């Protein structure tokens, strides 16, 4: 089968890989119909994160079940399914607590012995706990599928940022980052009832989409100027800050604008050299909570809203490619020509 493969910085190629098969009784094999390129993929693409040469890539799968192991109970061949970026058993201590990304029986796509989701087919370990079944009546509705695809990562991650920042009805939330996760965090904050959502970013087109998603104000300045503007808008600081980038500068901004006693939900993978941003958090007694989003924990509640038409994160996909177009998709995201790229293998 064909699969996207990492060959070095700025070099993702479509290559032949062995077709996956059932290896364990808890496995399933799916034919991938939709997947995506993630902003976090750009870390290795830009050479800013170690990645094994020749390894498959991608972690946002949606597809059709082709085969299941004898212990798989919740899906069967022919079912439309999707999965979060983490593999999880659904039964251990951490899965029961909603921390599926800490599952000791799981792992991550493109990890040892597991393929990447930017491929024609994918072996799914721990299928009972990992796969989410799409109701049959929506299984072939392309608009619905495109709205569900962000639940594999960015919509669940944006929701996790809002949950960790304790966003509730009537609150003011500050969302730092205008990538796909930040935009989904705007959606999530509005979904949880925030009265004001201030979106902070550097790209006017993305901030316009943030407004369409429910942002009441936007901030496009940088550094100290951005901090001053946020503090003016929030009368001295925000009780609910969502950090959706992971860069040192965005973490510093989040720490500075958090009001004493406030909450920061951070979901951007941290890439920092100097952890000095932690000092103001300590002295202001602000909470700093987050990590890799347990998207599986949120999948059903978010899917329910998508299916009833009250949640649609699909506008984050501003470019669509087929499997052979994945290298072009990486280039588009690297050059900020696309917010997020959808890969439609059925086109």
Image: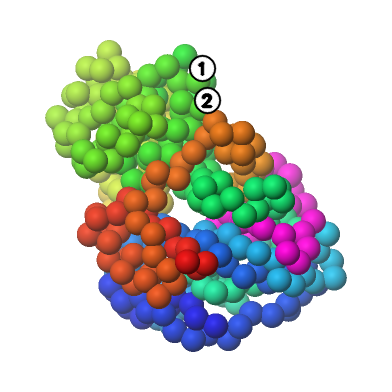
Q: Earlier in the sequence, mark 1 or mark 2?
A: 1
In this picture, is 134 found above or below 23? above
Q: Position of residue 104 (x, y in %)?
A: 67, 59
Task: Kindly report the distance in space between the C-alpha atoms of the residues bearing marks 1 and 2.
Answer: 6 Å
Magenta stretch encompasses residue 102: yes
The quadrant of the image that shows the N terminus is bottom right
Name which residue lies at 37% across and 53% down.
340
The quarter of the displayed image where residue 341 is located: bottom left
Tell me the residue that label 1 is attached to: 169
Q: Viewer-proximal residue, 235 or 309?
A: 309
Name which residue lies at 33% across and 46% down.
179
Q: Residues within 10 Å of mark 1 (few under 14, many from 20)?
A: few
Name which residue lies at 61% across and 63% down.
63
Q: Which residues are magenta?
A: 74-103
Q: Secondary structure at mark 2?
A: loop
Q: Position of residue 221 (x, y in %)?
A: 16, 34
In this picture, is 24 found above or below 138? below
Name which residue lies at 58% across and 86% down.
18
In this picture, is 101 found above or below 204? below
Q: Secondary structure at mark 1?
A: loop
Question: Position of 120 compared to 41: left or right?
Answer: right
Q: Position of residue 38 (x, y in %)?
A: 41, 57
Q: Residue 192: which numbered mark, if any?
A: 2
The quarter of the displayed image where residue 250 is located: top left
Mark 1 touching mark 2, by CB under 8 A?
Answer: yes
In this picture, is 120 found above or below 265? below
- Can see residue 22? yes
Q: Position of residue 207 (x, y in %)?
A: 27, 36
Q: Viewer-proximal residue, 340 or 153?
A: 340
Question: Position of 144 compared to 327: left or right?
Answer: right
- Can see residue 271? no
């Amino acid at each position: 089968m064909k699969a996207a493969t990492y060959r070095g910085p700025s070099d993702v190629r479509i290559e032949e890989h062995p077709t996956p098969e059932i290896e364990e009784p808890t496995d399933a094999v799916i034919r991938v119909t939709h997947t995506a390129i993630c902003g976090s993929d750009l870390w290795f693409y830009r050479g800013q994160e170690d990645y094994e040469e020749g390894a498959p890539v991608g972690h946002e799968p949606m597809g059709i079940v082709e085969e299941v192991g004898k212990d798989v109970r919740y899906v069967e061949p022919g079912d439309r399914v999707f999965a979060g970026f983490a593999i999880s058993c659904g039964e251990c201590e951490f899965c029961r607590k909603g921390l599926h990304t800490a599952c000791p029986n799981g792992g991550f796509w493109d990890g040892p012995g597991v393929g990447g989701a930017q491929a024609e087919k994918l072996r799914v370990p721990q299928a009972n706990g990992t796969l989410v079944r799409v109701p049959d009546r929506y299984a072939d509705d392309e608009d619905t599928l495109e709205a569900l695809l962000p639940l594999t990562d960015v919509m669940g991650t944006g929701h996790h940022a809002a949950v960790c920042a304790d966003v509730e009805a009537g609150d003011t939330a500050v969302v730092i980052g205008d990538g796909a996760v930040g935009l989904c965090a705007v959606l999530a904050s509005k979904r949880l009832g925030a009265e004001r959502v201030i979106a902070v970013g550097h790209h006017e087109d993305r901030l316009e989409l943030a407004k369409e998603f429910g942002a009441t104000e936007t901030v496009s300045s940088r550094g100290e100027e951005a901090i001053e503007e946020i503090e003016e808008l929030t009368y001295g600081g925000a009780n609910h800050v969502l950090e959706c980038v992971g860069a040192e500068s965005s973490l510093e901004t989040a720490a500075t604008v958090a009001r004493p006693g406030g909450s920061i939900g951070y979901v951007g993978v941290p890439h920092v050299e100097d952890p000095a941003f932690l000092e103001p958090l300590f002295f202001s007694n602000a909470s700093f909570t987050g990590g890799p989003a347990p998207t599986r924990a949120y999948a059903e509640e978010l899917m329910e809203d998508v299916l009833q038409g009250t949640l649609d994160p699909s506008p984050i996909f501003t470019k669509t490619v087929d499997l052979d177009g994945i290298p072009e998709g990486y280039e588009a995201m690297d050059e900020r020509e696309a917010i997020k790229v959808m890969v439609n293998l059925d086109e």
